[in-house]
Image (cartoon, helix red, strand yellow):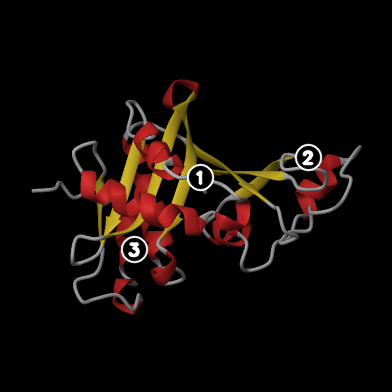
Amino acid sequence: MRKALALDRSVASVLGVKAELGLPSGGLRVSDLTGADTALIEQIAAFLPACFERYRYLQAPGEARAEVLRLLEAPRMSLVVLDEEEAAVGWCGGIPEYDGCVWELHLMAVRPDVQRRGVGQTLLAHFEARVRQQGGLTVTLTTDDVDGATSAFGIDPYPEIWRQIRDLRATDGHPVAFYQRCGYVVHGLIPDANGWGRPGILMAKRIA
């Protein structure tokens, strides 16, 4: 039997919305993903390319599966969201940094047909709870703007990059907007990370 993750109060409050998710009755369950979960690994690898198509990331054959396997290596963390039929509908992987005081949310994805139904919020809350349980203080992440979905796209941010960080705005469809709703703040830019005027956006949240 798969071991479900224990909840803290912050996670329990998020799961209070599961009746509104539009998913089958019974809601969602978040579990550790392990190397023994071969069927789930294949399911995740199957939906990752669609999730990252706009970034042209994880598109080559086998690339998505290799990334999932890479994030199973200790001491990294890999969590999967399961529906009532035990199918994978979401996944994330985290990497500890700075002796575990900080964790990078390296990847998070929700199967396209269940996006915008609270799955990502549920998964993120569980990830933060697990980081807290392991003594982590802050979660960081990087998300890119490759198609003009934020105010940082298509500009030369130098020399006052801090102004672009302070004033950054995103459309509702860009991940920055989702993470801001979840309490994350923009703390940096990587200018030209994806080519001229296509930055990487650094975000963080203190979770303890």
**Residue sitting at 33 percent across and 56 percent down?**
11
Q: Position of 191 compared to 90: left or right?
A: right
- Residue 92, image x and y in percent? 40, 47
For marks 1 and 2, give the one nearer the viewer: 1
How far is the residue under mark 2 from the one under mark 3? 37 Å
| Disc 2 residue type (three-letter) | Pro
Q: Secondary structure at mark 2?
A: loop
Horizontally, is 54 left or right of 6 in the view?
Answer: right
Give the side of residue 127 with respect to residue 191, left or right.
left
- Quarter of the picture containing the C terminus is top left
Between label 2 and label 3, give the one nearer the viewer. 2
Q: Amino acid at mark 3?
A: Ser
Disc 3 secondary structure class: helix
Q: Residue furthest left?
A: 1
Alpha carbons under labels 1 and 2: distance apart: 26 Å
Q: Earlier in the sequence, mark 1 or mark 2?
A: 1
Task: Point out the tag, 2 or 3, that comes first from the N-terminus.
Answer: 3
Distance from the alpha carbon under mark 3 to that under mark 1: 38 Å
Q: Amino acid at mark 1?
A: Ala
Name the residue that disc number 3 marks: 13
Return the residue nearer the eye: 50 or 128.
Answer: 50
Q: Is residue 101 above or below residue 150?
A: above
User: Of helix, strand and loop, which one carries label 1?
Assistant: loop
Circle 1: is it few (<14), some (14-19), or many (20+) Cα within 10 Å? few
> Callout 3: 10 Å neighbours few (<14), some, many (20+)?
few
Residue at the disc numbered 1:
60
Q: Which residue is mark 2?
A: 191
Viewer can see residue 6 = no
Query: Is the Cβ of the residue at disc 2 closer than 8 Å to that at disc 3?
Result: no
Most distant residue in the front direction: 61
Residue 34 screen position, x and y as percent: 24, 38
